[in-house]
C-alpha cells in the first residue's frame, strides 16, 4: 500500500497486487490485481478503482508525472472519481 495523495479533501492510496509474494499470509486478503482507493474526506465515502478504472486512473497519474498539475487540477479530477463513491468509510 502506498499513499499517493493526501489533502484536506481527499486521500488516494495505491494498493498493489500480491502476485509474486513469497510468503503468503493466510489471515490477510489477497489482491489479484492492483487498484486505487480514493477517499472523499468531505462526504466520508470511498471508492475502490480496479480493472479498467484503475488503468484509466494510472494513465492520469502518468500524465501528471509528465506535466505537474496544480492542486486545483488534481482536486477537480478526484472530485469526478469521488462521484462514484458509495461506500462509507468505516473504522475497524
Image: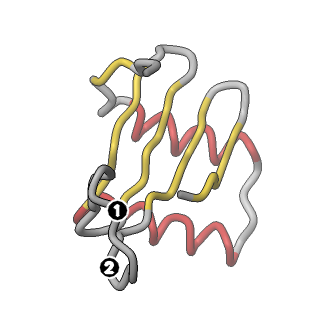
What residue is rendered at 47% in x and 16% in y? Answer: 44
Helix, strand or loop at label 2? It is loop
Q: Quadrant of residue 72?
A: top right
* Residue behind mark 2: 19
Q: Position of residue 31 (x, y in %)?
A: 28, 62
What residue is rendered at 51% in x and 27% in y? Answer: 40
Question: Looking at the rendering, in which quadrant would you find the C terminus?
Answer: top left
The CA distance from mark 2 to mark 1 is 13 Å
Q: Quadrant of residue 17?
A: bottom left
Residue 40 versus residue 15 in the image, above or below? above
Helix, strand or loop at label 1? It is loop
Q: Is residue 61 left or right of residue 64?
A: left
Q: Position of residue 62 (x, y in %)?
A: 56, 74
Q: Quadrant of residue 71?
A: top right
Q: Position of residue 21 (x, y in %)?
A: 38, 79
* Residue behind mark 1: 25
Q: Is residue 13 left or right of residue 29?
A: right
Render colour scheme: secondary structure
Amino acid at each position: 500500500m502506498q499513499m499517493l495523495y493526501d489533502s484536506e479533501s481527499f486521500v488516494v492510496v495505491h494498493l498493489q497486487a500480491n502476485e509474486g509474494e513469497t510468503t503468503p499470509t493466510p489471515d490477510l486478503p489477497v489482491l489479484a490485481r492492483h487498484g486505487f482507493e480514493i477517499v472523499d474526506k468531505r462526504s466520508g465515502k470511498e471508492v475502490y478503482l480496479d480493472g479498467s478504472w484503475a488503468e484509466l486512473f494510472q494513465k492520469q497519474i502518468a500524465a501528471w508525472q509528465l506535466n505537474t498539475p496544480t492542486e486545483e487540477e488534481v482536486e477537480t479530477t478526484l472530485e469526478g472519481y469521488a462521484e462514484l463513491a458509495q461506500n462509507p468509510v468505516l473504522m475497524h
